[in-house]
Amino acid sequence: MTAILPSDQSNIIERRLSEGRATQSEITHFLVVHYYATLHRLALSLLSQSEEAADVAQQTIIKAAAKIDQYQPGTNFKAWVFKIAVNEARMAIRRNQARQRLKNILTLGLQADSQPLPPEAQMILSERDRSIWKAVSELPTKQKLPVLLRYSFGLTDQEISEILEVPHGTVRSRLHNAHKKLFVMLAKQEVKGLR
Amino acid sequence: MMNRKNNIHEEIQELLVQKNTLWPDELSRVNAHLKVCDQCQSFANFLEEMNQRNWNPYASETVSAQEKQSILRMIELNQRSRPQKSQQNIAAFTQSIASVAFFVILAALLFLIVRPDLGSVAFLSSSRDKSIERDYDGWELGVAFDVPDELKYQFTVVVEGYQLGNVMGLSNRPIMEEDLFSPWKLDVGETRAMISVKNPIFDLSGNPEVHMHEFSGYFNGFSGNYEFIEFAGRTTYFLESNYLGRDYVDATFFTGERLVRIYIEGKPDSEGNMPDIKNMARLMAESMLEVEYDGWQTWQDNELNMHIVLPENLSATDNIGGQSLFIFEENAELNEDWIIWYGHSSQVTKLSAADLREMGGLFLESPEFDILEYGNLSSMYPTAQLVQDLSDELPNHLQRMSLYETRDGQYLLAAAMFNWISEYDPPLLVMTLQFDQSELDSTQFDFSKVWRGMRTTTVPLIKPEQLIADPYYGQHSTVNSTSFTNHVGTEMVTDFSELELVIESISQKLGKTQVNYFLRPSSSDIAQFSAQAIEGRLFNELGNEIPYAGGSSELMRWGDDGSYNPPSTVRFDGALNHSPNNTLTLFVDVILFWVEATNEIFIDLSSREWGDYWTINQTTHFNGASVTFTEVWLDEEDQILKMRGELNQSNSLYHIKDLYHTQNSDVQLKLEGAYVELNYQLQTLEQTSISLFLQSTIQYEDAISVSFIVNEQGDVIKKDG
């Protein structure tokens, strides 16, 4: 369902990068046109806050364009860009966590809740999908990231491993634990629904 | 047998996860198993649902072409206002960098031979000639100067940036000037030259007049005549000008490839200084070398008006209040150790945690809470033991950097300095790292560079250990997070013996006597204390209490400037029917201070159901006390998690007055004597763990007294106590 970057577009920019002919403006343009929507979706999935997600996506593009000399032509460009996006999102999560913790401390209440779904999303999702999303949202970030990257963005374990900069085996074990946890959580919800 | 069965399911489920890459025989084995195993079939269905991707509500978010255009414009605007290295620039610089790097390495080696005692940052102040000192290497800006000694000691050299966009700079002063406190003192009737190093941020067409125009626009009223000079391949001009009634001479020039603009400003105190300043500017300009620090980036926060520079693997983000920066490795997992630059806010640090809580949202964004919550520094600081004072290894303007070892097996690097706002709220840079020599070796250099890159002025008065030392160390098991707020940058009163009760004045009017008194620390080392004088009572020499209207209960706070404010006042309503030399004793009951502690208790519910009862042995420490929880019950009827425990007070000086939960109003705590009961209203049992943040209020009460003899005029003629 999610459109992943067309590989031929990647090839064009790859070629220009390897020839050292890609200007920063070109790279920025390319990233906005071909990556922005995907990056925005990734950030939204992690943050559930539209404005912040837009910031993360834009910041990712700015950084990617600025650091383009660090990209090694021939390696996975998509994974490289996603790696920047994930780190940007992590920073945003840190900020959010700080805000939430402060709020909790100083207002003596209001546990950190997972972000409520926007109304339009409530409309779109079936009850079952809402349950899955809720379960995924409640996963710790370490597990949620590989789940989102794999299932929402169709990335391979190898790509996830590159993005998160963890060994392949770690990706598999995190996914394994996430699967187990999700499976149990969903089964519990199902039982409750039957009651 | 059971294990084997489970293993089969695990194996099949693992294969299902990798379904797309299975070999045919593996696939048929999986399919065969699914036909006979409902559990694995459910798991397969679950994976199928995950793969369909319909569950992510944001997966269908789209961005229109128009939106993309506007985003592109925004990004390009951002890129224009933030200079970034382009591919071409990098390529063009490579050759020059190589040659410069060669010279830098050569200089470093030579310097290490000459001055091996200065450690890893020694090359920063390398000296090629006895009469010339490499005073400023440009740091991340990539330029270096030599400042001739004979001129250096005639003028104070300050390398500084002006607040124009992304301008950044560093402060530097010669060792001889260390005793000077702050820039404003330099401004008062002193001669100085100021060197400003700037990144190119505006039009860099090469016309210095454009830049000078911008600069003079910033400094309203700045004007003068240009004198263009070319040397060392750079376009330079001097400007003699008058600004705010003082004569200036400026030299502005541009480096060849890097387009770094250097601005040297000299403020002569007499006409005779002008040629010297001009000469110095020339010599410095001629000495300028490029130095490449590839991968270092400048960071400027939004509100603190501070600059830092970071190696590429580190990122910074402003905290919510903009009064501190979190510095961390981009790729680090959440909650791993971070470097934290702690920009103090004196207003906030002097408030207790209770004050903060009462003020609610007003201090919602205080940096202390961020740092305490994230870095858990407060529990680390009190246990930190000084290993090595690294101050001497730093360039002369960077003072007091130390290495500590913490109890939990980590290194803590800390550096402190004074800024120009107040000597009592020095910014701190701290970093924790694993207890590993090689990591320390590699990190220490980066740390000192980050520290050095902070744009501010330093005064070498206080060591970091003084700032982070906690008076409770060695007396209590744990120093909690929030009490850290009370101790930063100050020496707190910890005992009544450290307080003096001082009679300020006694006056008599119309037969009524008024006694004004105040409390003050007995040692000048104590910078601050908080105490509440709750009651004052006056007795005569026979021990009879003399009635009066009651004392003030205002909070006593010892101010930063050494003054007390406000003094407590005891006013006597009744006439003092004393004979000459009547002895009076004033007793004042004081609550010395309140300490708040926050500690976390973790309860694992992963395998629990409603109705479960189990025992635990979880102790959470507060100042001088601890609470040990022993029983947990998931009360199904009321959907409440109940816990019982006992409070152990080990400190006789003060007692825990109250216990409450800091984060969740659903958690109720009862403290009756030593008995503690916790009730937590849970909505569901789906969560697998619960963290409880308990907080305590500690009260420390005592009385202090002073005896005095007053004569008929009300003068204190003798004092004791």
Image (cartoon, grey):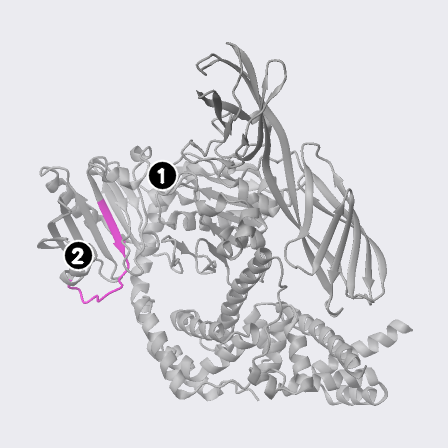
SS at circle 2: helix
Q: Residue at x 66, y 77 (%)?
A: A134
Extent of the magenta region: B194-207
Nearest to the observer: residue A139 or residue B709: B709
Q: Which of the two discs, 1 and 2, sits closer to the camera?
A: 2
Q: Which amino acid lies under the numbered mark 2 shown in the image of this protein?
A: Ser
The label shown at residue B583 is none
Residue located beneath label 2 in the image: B216
Nearest to the observer: residue A168 or residue A126: A126
Q: Residue at x 85, y 60 (%)?
A: B613
The secondary structure that dominates the magenta segment is loop
Alpha carbons under labels 1 and 2: distance apart: 32 Å
Chain label for disc 1: B
Residue B692 location (% of width, % of height)? 69, 56
Residue B673 location (% of width, % of height)? 77, 42
Q: Which residue is drawn at 77% across and 52% down?
A: B677
Q: How packed is label 2: few (under 14 Cα within 10 Å), some, or many (20 or more)?
A: some
Residue B279 location (% of width, % of height)? 14, 43
